[in-house]
Amino acid sequence: MKTQFFFEDIDEGFIFGPIEKNIDRKQLVMYAGASQDFNEFHYDDEVAKKAGHKGIIIHGALKSAWLAQLLVDIVGHEGRIIKFNVSYRGVDFPYDDLKYYGKVIKKSIEGSKGVVDIELNLENSKGQITTPSTAQIELPIKKMRK
Amino acid sequence: MSQSETISDEMKKFINLKTRPKIYTVDRHSVERFAEAIGDDNPIYFNETYAKKTMGGLIAPPTYVRLLRPNKLEKEFPEPFSNLVDGGSSYNFYEHIYVGDKISVVSKLKDLFIKTGKIGDMLFKLTLISYTNQKKILVTTQEVTTITYGKGEKTFL
């Protein structure tokens, strides 16, 4: 199991990741079923082309689920996600080499809580940031435990 | 360039309308299926013993609420465009959602505006969805930006 991150473990500028993803059509069909989003431009190329895309596109919400997964892994069992804001600036496609990562922007102590602001980005294989996002999380503070 | 689309009075009437609450029971299999579909094998979603010890029980991934769709309004929105993209979401998380919870989902259209870009006029809809558990605790909110654009054969549901 992953180790718990503490507020003291990370400084401004600390990078989580990157995590690489290259997904197939099957994963989009699985996500369509699991989220009940049956918009056809996620699995039918013809419909995607009619909507102006080169082919089927990844659900924005699936990309946000990956970014949220990174946050869940960071906060561990003792922290929590407070806010998560994601925008889909560009569409992404299956079989493209995508990667995402998070960067610590700001740390502050509010009461007995360690609050960390993180900027997360998902990039396509051309290095374009298609899915910028921000989050605020709470991490446990080591010295509060003594 | 076609004539600029505007927000009609008919559309404005939808602002602040709330949907009837829709209640979902969070079942274990839907959580597992969701976690599998996003490619997350974290045992807090799969292993009851482990989840009980660490989180107080099996929980749902943060964006699992995407599955908990609100009811539709009784009247259909007068949609002027034929294509749709999801513009993004803004979540606030207050409490975990646990397997077995009964979550009540209510959606409200907050705002509508038009922007003009490369692909012509686009209609932005900001919708606030609230998720409340059986203890009447607001567990999550999600503000969704939906963008519609283009004329022609409708390509979304």
Image (cartoon, rainbow, N blue to C red):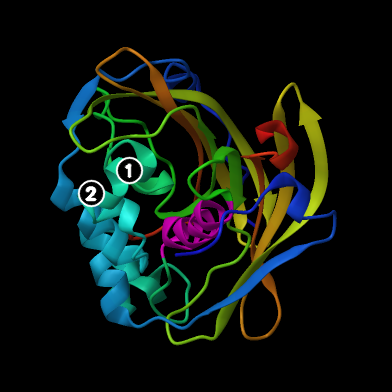
A145 sits to left or right of A69: right
Q: Residues within 10 Å of mark 1 (few under 14, many from 20)?
A: few
Q: Which residue is pictured at 47% across the width and 81% down the height?
A: A54
Q: Residue at x 24, y 56 (%)?
A: B46
Could you tell me which secondary element the residue under label 2 belongs to?
helix
Q: Quadrant of the N terminus of chain A?
A: bottom left
Q: Is residue A64 magenta?
A: yes
Residue type beneath disc 1: Lys
Residue B104 position, x and y percent, is: 26, 22
Which one is nearer the viewer's eye here, A37 or B83? A37
Q: Which span is picked out in magenta?
A: A59-74
Q: Which residue is mark 2?
A: B49
- Mark 2 residue type: Thr
Q: Is residue B107 magenta?
A: no
The residue under label 1 is B53
Task: Please say if the residues under marks 1 and 2 sit with CB atoms less than 8 Å apart.
Answer: yes
Q: Quadrant of residue A59?
A: bottom left
Residue in the foreground of this view, choosing between A97 and B74? A97
